[in-house]
């Protein structure tokens, strides 16, 4: 126990020094990696994951693992009178919670950004969810993984598997854990996230996710919806990364909606330490991007003939912009994260978004719907009159 106390004190000192010297912000702004399980389902699967990677003596000493039987997301934003210790079932309060586990169905991939991004960013917290594709259904082709929460399954899960929108996989019985159901996988991922933040207290949650992505089994060949997204995690390799400066840039989340003449683009920034701002380029959809690159350079974008359409200001929480829809033909865009020094996140399988030309997929204007409905009604009345 003394060893764990000394380790905890060392981490606090290390955090304080690194923040004062490097980032000039207080350690108080860094959320504790305490865990809240939203509901009692799968709550006992969090602590074993923490123990598997950092050893015993950390749970309920440096990382508190609690649950709320009411399963409220607001537990991440304010203290709740109903939170209990998973270990003792006693009423406790270890707010703020840095990691939340929502073990019920299901992550919706990039659609999670609209639901959780602002809440999680304001709370300096992260959320783990299962994919549970056999329960919630497969996601549409092209669905990207969530930007700020995680979506996980495993090879031997009875209700999950791989598909569009997944972010990570766990190999069967990873580190001796029970991975036979996506709820257990989500709980294990919760523990892994908390343990990484415990080991790297000066990193933000995007840094934590970036470390898990670039150390996972699919990173070298790129995201694949058919191979558990970024692949099977390797917690030890992620933990071995020593600095956020060594973490590769990751792409922002993107949502595109169209009107008659414009495409409205909403970006959910991947706010890792190296990130400066976001950019949107139009590209040739048939261009083959160089394989095996961890990041793109300005020269790669030039070689691709990419045209810059938009740069965010780097400060808006959720940047938005409008782009005129082409008259003909449609064009393709990608949104990238840049460090402002000529480095960019790479183009993944889910990165390309087609902007249709005007007239393709354009919603029918309300006035036209009224005219059409009136015409159909008139036609029906005429037919009835003639038949009478």
Image (cartoon, grey):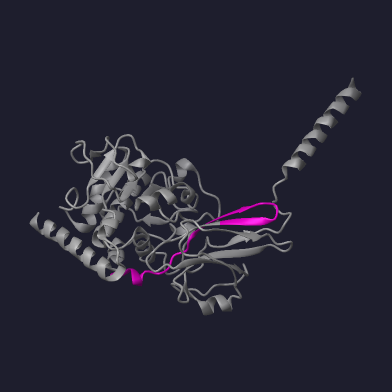
Q: Nearer the viewer, residue 327 or 45?
A: 327
Q: Nearer the viewer, residue 132 or 87?
A: 87
Magenta-span inclusion, residue 301: no
Total numbered circles? 0
Magenta-span inclusion, residue 253: yes
- Kindly tell me whether residue 267 is visible in this rendering: yes
Residue name at image x 52 percent, y 60 percent: 350
Q: In which quarter of the image is the N terminus?
A: bottom left
**Where in the figure is residue 338, as x and y percent of width and height?**
47, 70
**Where in the figure is residue 270, as x and y percent of width and height?**
43, 61
Is 371 located above or below residue 245 in the figure? above
- Kindly tell me whether residue 152 is visible in this rendering: no
Quadrant of res 374: top right
**Horizontal relation, residue 1 to residue 106: left or right:** left
- Which residue is outermost to the left? 2
Is 276 located above or below residue 2 in the figure? below
Q: In which quarter of the image is the C terminus?
A: top right
**Where in the figure is residue 87, as x and y percent of width and height?**
19, 41
- Which residue is outermost to the top? 388
**Where in the figure is residue 17, as x and y percent of width and height?**
22, 67
**Horizontal relation, residue 46 to residue 296: left or right:** left
Is 109 located above or below residue 93 in the figure? below
- Which residue is outermost to the right? 386
Region rendered in magenta: 242-265
**Horizontal relation, residue 173 to residue 266: left or right:** left
């Amino acid at each position: 126990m003394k060893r764990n106390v000394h380790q905890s004190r060392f981490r606090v000192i290390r955090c304080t020094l690194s923040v004062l010297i490097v980032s000039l912000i207080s350690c108080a702004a860094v959320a504790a990696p305490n865990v809240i399980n939203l509901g009692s389902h799968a709550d006992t699967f969090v602590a074993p994951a923490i123990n598997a990677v950092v050893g015993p003596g950390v749970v309920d000493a440096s990382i508190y693992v609690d649950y709320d039987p009411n399963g409220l997301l607001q537990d991440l934003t304010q203290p709740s009178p109903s939170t209990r210790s998973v270990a003792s079932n006693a009423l406790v309060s270890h707010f703020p919670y840095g990691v939340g586990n929502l073990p019920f169905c299901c992550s919706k991939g990039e659609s999670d950004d609209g639901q959780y991004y602002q809440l999680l960013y304001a709370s300096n917290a992260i959320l783990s969810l299962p994919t549970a594709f056999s329960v919630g259904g497969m996601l549409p082709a092209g669905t990207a993984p969530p930007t700020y929460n995680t979506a996980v399954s495993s090879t031997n899960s009875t209700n999950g598997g791989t598909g569009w929108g997944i972010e990570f996989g766990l190999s069967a019985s990873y580190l001796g854990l029970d991975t036979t159901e996506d709820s257990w996988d989500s709980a294990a991922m919760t523990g892994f996230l908390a343990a990484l933040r415990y080991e790297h207290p000066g990193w933000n949650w995007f840094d934590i996710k970036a470390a898990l992505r670039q150390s996972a089994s699919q990173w070298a060949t790129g995201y694949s919806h058919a191979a558990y997204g970024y692949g099977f995690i390797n917690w030890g390799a992620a933990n071995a990364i020593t600095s956020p400066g060594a973490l590769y840039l990751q792409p922002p989340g993107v949502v595109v909606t169209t009107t008659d003449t414009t495409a409205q683009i909403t970006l959910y920034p991947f706010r890792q330490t190296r990130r400066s701002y976001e950019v949107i380029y139009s590209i040739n959809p048939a261009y083959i991007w160089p394989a095996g690159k961890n990041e793109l350079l300005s020269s790669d974008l030039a070689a691709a003939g990419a045209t810059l359409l938009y740069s965010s200001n780097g400060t808006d929480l959720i940047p938005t912009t409008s782009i005129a829809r082409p008259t003909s033909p449609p064009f393709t865009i990608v949104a990238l994260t840049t460090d402002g020094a000529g480095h960019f996140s790479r183009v993944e399988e889910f990165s390309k978004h087609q902007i249709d030309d005007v007239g393709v997929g354009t919603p029918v204007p309300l006035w036209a719907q009224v005219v059409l409905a009136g015409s159909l009604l008139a036609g029906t009345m005429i037919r009835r009159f003639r038949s009478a």
